[in-house]
Amino acid sequence: MQLDGLTAFCTASGAGIGLATARALRAEGARVIATDISEDALAPLAGEGIETHRLDVTDGAAVAALAESVGAVDILFNCAGFVHHGTILDCDEEDFDFSMGLNVKGTYRVTRALLPAMLENGGGSIITVASVASSIIAAPNRFVYSATKAALIGMTKSIAADYVTQGIRANAICPGTVESPSLQGRMRAQGDYETARAAFVARQPMGRIGAPEEIADLAVFLAGPRSSFITGQAIAIDGGWSNT
Ligand code: NAD
């Protein structure tokens, strides 16, 4: 299998894209260390040959302690993120700090904690889940979310440039709309579920919402040797949304 002998560390593995990716990495032979803020959400993975640890990426001490105990990994999958709904005027300073703290600083914190051992170990692949709603395209009511995801693309490119000669590759996955518990919540929050769902579907010219497993397939590719010449890229996977 393409990831035999490799160790993957994943955040936000309890649902959606993170859950599908932890399973896909394991299915390709990786040893998977799956983390999430919710211990309950991780419970099913424990019976699937996946190591699980509760981890809130906004908790610096917890991130440092787990990174220390885990040591060198070959694959880092940064998935933790929150979607704030609204414009700049809907986003007060608390909202701004929460999204920046989770999406941007959480990713920075986990990557910075794991990178030294990856470098000592000869390198690895860092994959960060951004979004097409970022520096790629605009989406209405995604003010601070898009700012955080654009920041993740910038961070990815910077890390890729700084460590390209030391065996590190860093790439960002930029999904369009993907089925997940939080997407369901965003649809319900709009009041009329069917109308909201139709609007989310319509964003993709393919006329459907993506499956988490489709994103996981790209993550597996970026994690392993088949993508060995790819670094510093923000790869859209969005049913054609950003092509319109
Ligand atoms: P989701 O939002 O439904 O679930 C995310 C998981 O993150 C949950 O298990 C939750 O417990 C965990 N989590 C929340 N806060 C955390 C924290 N502080 N530390 C660790 N884990 C935490 O899943 P999703 O919609 O697949 O989103 C995953 C990632 O993909 C996010 O970064 C999101 O922005 C990104 N993304 C999602 C979509 C989409 O349409 N679903 C599109 C583009 C990008």
Image (spheres, helix red, strand yellow):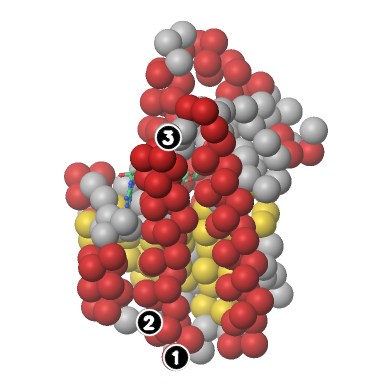
Q: Position of residue 244 (x, y in %)?
A: 80, 33
Left or right: 166 with respect to 4? right
Q: Amino acid at mark 2?
A: Ala
The residues tagged by marks 3 and 1 sit, at their Cα atoms, a distance apart of: 42 Å
**Considering the numbered disc 2 on the image, is that residue within a helix, a strand or a loop?**
loop
What residue do we see at 46% from left, 21% from top? 187
Left or right: 65 with respect to 99? left
Q: Which mark is residue 72?
A: 2
Q: Position of residue 199 (x, y in %)?
A: 60, 18
Q: Amino acid at mark 1?
A: Glu
User: Can you see residue 225?
Assistant: no
What residue do we see at 63% from left, 45% from top? 134
Residue on which the image places disc 1: 120
* Lower sequence index among marks 3 and 2: 2
Residue on which the image places disc 3: 92
**Considering the numbered disc 1 on the image, is that residue within a helix, a strand or a loop?**
helix
**Considering the numbered disc 3 on the image, is that residue within a helix, a strand or a loop?**
loop
The residues tagged by marks 3 and 2 sit, at their Cα atoms, a distance apart of: 39 Å
